[in-house]
Image (cartoon, rainbow, N blue to C red):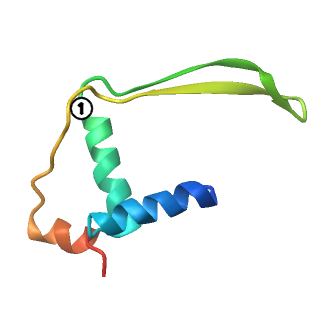
Amino acid sequence: MDVSFDKETEAKLKELAEEANLSTEGLIEVVMHQWANNTGSRVYTGRWSGGEVDGVKGFRYVVQWPFKPGFIEAPGDMVKKWRLE
């Protein structure tokens, strides 16, 4: 899987990862695991009339986060994979 972010988002992800002693990839994996596996996670979509560029109509994405915090009990192999080296 190949994912890219704008510079501002990437900088914020790096900051959050360092606070948690995780690599950026590890932080993304932890957060997305919790989001995808908790009840209430959804992405709603709809047209956005103001966003047309080069003939392609804009779209609005509304991300709904679960209403409860989640936690992962990570065994050593996952800690090793995610930790900031």
Q: Determine whether the residue tagged by mark 1 lies in a helix, strand or loop.
A: loop
Residue visible at 62% across and 61% down in the picture: 7
Residue 52: in sight, yes or no? Answer: yes
- Where does the image place residue 40, in percent across and percent down from the top left? 30, 23
Image position of 34 with respect to 23: above or below: above
Q: Determine whether, in the image, residue 78 is placed left or right of residue 5.
A: left
Kind of residue sitting beneath label 1: Asn
Residue that label 1 marks? 38
Q: Residues within 10 Å of mark 1 (few under 14, many from 20)?
A: some
- Where does the image place residue 62, in percent across and percent down from the top left? 52, 25
Image position of 31 with respect to 45: above or below: below
**Quarter of the image holding residue 17?**
bottom left
The quadrant in which the C terminus is found is bottom left
Residue visible at 30% across and 65% down in the picture: 19
Residue visible at 15% across and 46% down in the picture: 71
**Quarter of the image holding residue 59?**
top right
